[in-house]
Amino acid sequence: MNTFGKNFAVTTFGESHGPAVGAVIDGCPARLALSTADIQPLLDRRRPGASPLTSARSESDTVEILSGVFEGTTTGAPVALLVRNKDVHSEDYEALREKFRPGHADFTYQEKYGCRDHRGGGRSSGRETVGRVAAGAVALKYLATKGIAITGRIVSVHGKTAPQEIEQEILAAKAAGDSVGGIAEIVATGCPAGLGDPVFGKLDAAIAGAMMGIGAVKGVGIGDGFEVAGRFGSANNDPMTKTGFASNHAGGILGGISTGQEIVVRIAVKPTPSIAKVQQTRDIHGNVVAITVGGRHDPCIVPRILPVAEAMLALVLADAALEQEKYR
């Protein structure tokens, strides 16, 4: 399950401490103007080492286009995107070779495959999202030709909503050897009505699956999300007028199909599981042991998850837009 999408299909590859990470896009329409300049800005927003609020891992995350583009435009052939890992400190993880990190996929990978890459989590690392972001940037370029744009913002971190308080909360957690989570919002504007399919092909189901496919995400809300559970129908319905809708509690999707309004998605992001505090865990022999996780980690994933979530929403909408073209 390393491939996402049907019409705009993206396969990501690579591990946290391998030589490179990246993605291959199969189904990108031909004659789309594309260069590394279209992809790099989104990767720059995701990359580590950019501020004291993020991991100290120093990666330029410079993207290379290996195929599918000729003389500045896509050809219809698979677009291969590569980002080389430059700042790898695998020795930081040697003490974790036989220990399962709490909150990580170490234990479940070992149970499923009978082996695992202990160096930063290998394939389960957040480093895997580099390929998603690179592919998502291409999807964003395609969506722009349809008048669709996607933006993201931090709603809160550990209950704090003001930017200065958010920064202080993250730095305080970092100083304590701990981490914090938060809520992010991603919005698509300019999306036409009619995207998505009924029953098992619902647009909101695809979006929820895409967001939950991001390792740090533990909850997804479309529109007003969980708030709707406490309302009357008369307050939650979006009245229709001659010019459209009077409100957007549904988040731009009804019956699994886009309404033409803004598509609004919120995600709950867990605290980074890699923390310096001493925790109890198990080793591969079944012994209960103490663990403290060294290396370089984000005290809060929320700031760097924004471009990842934007990319995943872009991949869903690009796939849905290409599917809709079949109806015409």
Image (cartoon, helix red, strand yellow):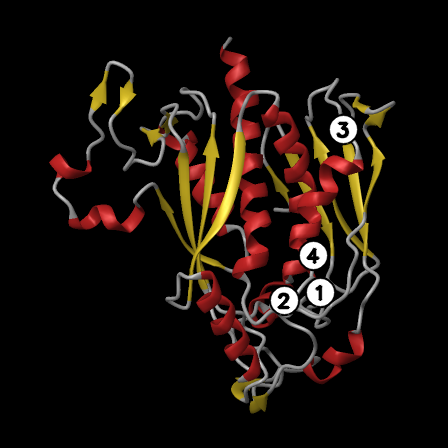
> Above or below — where is 140 with respect to 32?
below
- Residue drawn at the location 59% of the way across and 30% of the way down: 6
Q: Categorize mark 4 by other alpha carbons within 10 Å: few (<14), some (14-19), many (20+).
A: many
Three-letter code for the amino acid on which mark 4 is drawn: Arg
Q: Is residue 324 left or right of residue 229?
A: right
> Above or below — where is 151 with respect to 217?
above
SS for callout 4: loop
Q: CA distance from mark 3 to mark 2?
A: 29 Å
Report which residue position mark 1 lands on.
Answer: 49
Q: Are marks 1 and 2 in contact (CB under 8 Å)?
A: yes
Three-letter code for the amino acid on which mark 3 is drawn: Leu
Q: Is residue 70 left or right of residue 288?
A: right
Q: Are marks 4 and 1 in contact (CB under 8 Å)?
A: yes
Q: Categorize mark 2 by other alpha carbons within 10 Å: few (<14), some (14-19), many (20+).
A: many
Report which residue position mark 4 lands on.
Answer: 47
Q: Whole-percent x and y of residue 155?
A: 42, 55
Q: Which mark is residue 34?
A: 3
Q: Categorize mark 3 by other alpha carbons within 10 Å: few (<14), some (14-19), many (20+).
A: many
Report which residue position mark 2 lands on.
Answer: 54
Q: CA distance from mark 2 to mark 4?
A: 9 Å
Q: Residue furthest front?
A: 164
